[in-house]
Each structure stands twice: as C-alpha cells, then as structure tokens.
C-alpha cells in the first residue's frame, strides 16, 4: 500500500481540482485543513494551521509526497518554513510547491513572501519541485466582477495578465507530484496575454453592461515592474489551452 499524498490548501480552488485527479490516479489523499471535516472515500482530513504550527506533525506523519498549495495575502513564508521543518523530520521524499510568476521580479510584499517560501522549499534538504503559475481565471474573474460594479472601469496602463485555468494547473501539478522531484520547472501560463480592458470587455458584453474605461497609472516600483511585464513569462513557459473567453462563457452560462 502506498502512503497517502498530503495536500495543504486541498479545500481551495486549486485543491478542489487537484484532489480528484490524485484519487483517480489511485492515491489516497490527506488534507491539512483549519476546519474539521469527516473522511470520505480515500480522503482523510487533519485539522491544523500552518501559521500556528498546529496539526502539522500529524499531517506529515507517514507521508512521502507533499503538495503545498495553501497560501494567503501574508505569512506564506512562515507557513512554508513550518511545513518544511515538519516534513524534514518526517522523512518526506518529495515536496512540491505552487508559486506565482513574478515572485522574483515584482517588488510587492506578498510576492516577497512567495519568493522566500520558494527559498525555504529549495533549501529544505528535501527533494523538491516548484511550479510558478499565472493568475487563475477565477481570481481574474473576481477582480473584473468587483471592478465592473464601479460606474467607471479603471484600467491600469501597461498592466497585462496571462490568466490560466486552475484545472490545467491541477493537471500539471498532478503530473509533477507523481513524477520525480524536478526543481524549478517551466512556468505555466494561460494561452493569451491581455490588458485589463481586454479582460473586461467580454465580461461586460456577456453581462449586458457598459462601462467607460478610465486609464490609470500604477505608481512606484511595482508600477514600473508591471509595465515592464515582470509578472509575465513570454518565453519558455508551458501554456494552457483554455482561454479567458471560454472560461467566461462557461462561468456566466
């Protein structure tokens, strides 16, 4: 019998797509979650909190592969260090981390925590794999939906995104988890590059709305980084196939 695969963040958007793929591959899954849940067929839940260090030892006990998907607006670096320490003591043989494109180039605090988390994984002494992905369609949808509630739609000049479908990210992570540790693998992006206006127009059209577009400028170092495309990977990335428009038609059907 193989050991279960531990997934942190297994109840989130990405985990919701990834866990069924792991089960379909024949693996039992253990999920570290802040809220208690009853076990289901092949899926066990361990209650804990990476930021508080609670339940982590029990989560990694007897596990050989860990997929670290959990993340938030702050504290990802400390949470990852907590997981790394426990995984090292437990003899984990493959630690896989999902990061974000631009973690090493965009000067934002939450990006720095992602980069530091990457460093904790790479320096853990555990064989590892890190995948940097673009913004998920779901995240971009939330951003566009909220902004479209304003009477005028602000469009930051020079900001471009490569939204990727989380199902394709989940499929890639499953492939990596079932393979050998590979270090930093090629980034995963969506098939197209859009500015915010191009992302908003099909949304507004499907909603039957109109909004005037107002150009705005992102100030400071972060603005310069975004205008330079530091959050993009235009060469050498693996690109998904599902487009933003296809996602929208399905989401708003």
Image (tube, rainbow, N blue to C red):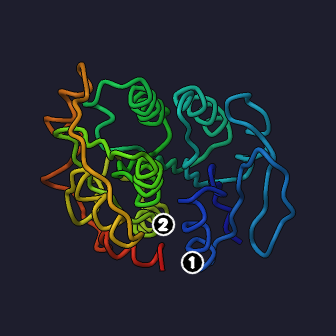
Q: Which mark is residue 244?
A: none
Q: Is residue 251 left or right of residue 48?
A: left
Tell me: residue 207, above or below residue 230: below
Q: Is residue 103 left or right of residue 2?
A: left
Tell me which residue sits at (85%, 52%) in the image: 36
Please give the count of numbered marks on the rendered protein: 2
Q: CA distance from mark 1 to mark 2?
A: 9 Å
- Residue topped by disc 2: 174
Q: Secondary structure at mark 2?
A: helix
**Which circle's residue, 1 or 2, is located before the other in the chain?**
1
Tell me which residue sits at (36%, 25%) in the image: 108
Tell me which residue sits at (60%, 65%) in the image: 16
In the rendering, at what x and y percent does residue 197 appear?
A: 24, 53
Taking depth in this image into account, of 54 and 226 the one nearest to the observer is 226
Q: Is residue 241 left or right of residue 89?
A: left
Answer with the quarter of the image where residue 88 lies.
top right
- Assess whether mark 2 and mark 1 are in contact (beta carbons under 8 angstroms): yes
In the rendering, at what x and y percent does residue 165 appear?
A: 39, 65
- Residue topped by disc 1: 25
Q: Could you classify mark 2 by the number of other residues whose Cα lies within 10 Å: few (under 14), some (14-19), or many (20 or more)? A: some
Q: Is residue 157 left or right of residue 248?
A: left
Q: Secondary structure at mark 1?
A: loop
- Quadrant containing the N terminus is bottom right
Tell me: residue 56, above or below residue 238: above
Tell me: residue 27, above or below residue 142: below
In the rendering, at what x and y percent does residue 116 appear?
A: 43, 27
Taking depth in this image into account, of 143 and 59 the one nearest to the observer is 143
In the rendering, at what x and y percent does residue 196 appear?
A: 27, 50
Q: Could you classify mark 1 by the number of other residues whose Cα lies within 10 Å: few (under 14), some (14-19), or many (20 or more)? A: few
Tell me which residue sits at (22%, 47%) in the image: 160
């Amino acid at each position: 019998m193989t050991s279960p695969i531990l997934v942190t963040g297994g109840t989130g958007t990405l985990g919701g797509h990834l866990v069924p793929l792991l089960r379909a591959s024949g693996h039992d899954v253990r999920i570290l979650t802040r809220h208690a849940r009853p076990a289901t067929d092949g899926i066990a839940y361990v209650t804990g909190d990476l930021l508080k260090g609670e339940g982590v030892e029990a989560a990694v006990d007897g596990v050989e592969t860990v997929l670290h998907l959990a993340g938030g607006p702050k504290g990802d670096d400390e949470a990852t260090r907590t997981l790394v320490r426990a995984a090292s003591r437990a003899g984990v043989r493959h630690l896989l981390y999902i990061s974000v494109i631009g973690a090493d180039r965009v000067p934002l605090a939450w990006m720095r925590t992602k980069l530091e988390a990457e460093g904790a994984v790479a320096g853990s002494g555990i064989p590892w794999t890190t995948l940097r992905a673009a913004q998920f369609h779901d995240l971009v949808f939330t951003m566009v939906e909220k902004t479209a509630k304003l009477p005028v739609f602000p469009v930051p000049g020079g900001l471009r995104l490569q939204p990727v479908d989380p199902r394709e990210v989940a499929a890639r992570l499953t492939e990596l988890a079932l393979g050998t540790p590979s270090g930093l693998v090629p980034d995963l992006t969506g098939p197209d590059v859009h500015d915010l206006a191009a992302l908003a127009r099909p949304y507004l059209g499907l909603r039957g709305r109109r909004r005037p577009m107002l150009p705005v400028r992102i100030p400071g170092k972060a603005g310069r980084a975004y205008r330079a495309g530091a959050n993009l990977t235009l060469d050498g990335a693996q690109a998904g196939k599902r487009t933003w428009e296809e996602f929208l038609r399905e989401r708003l059907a």
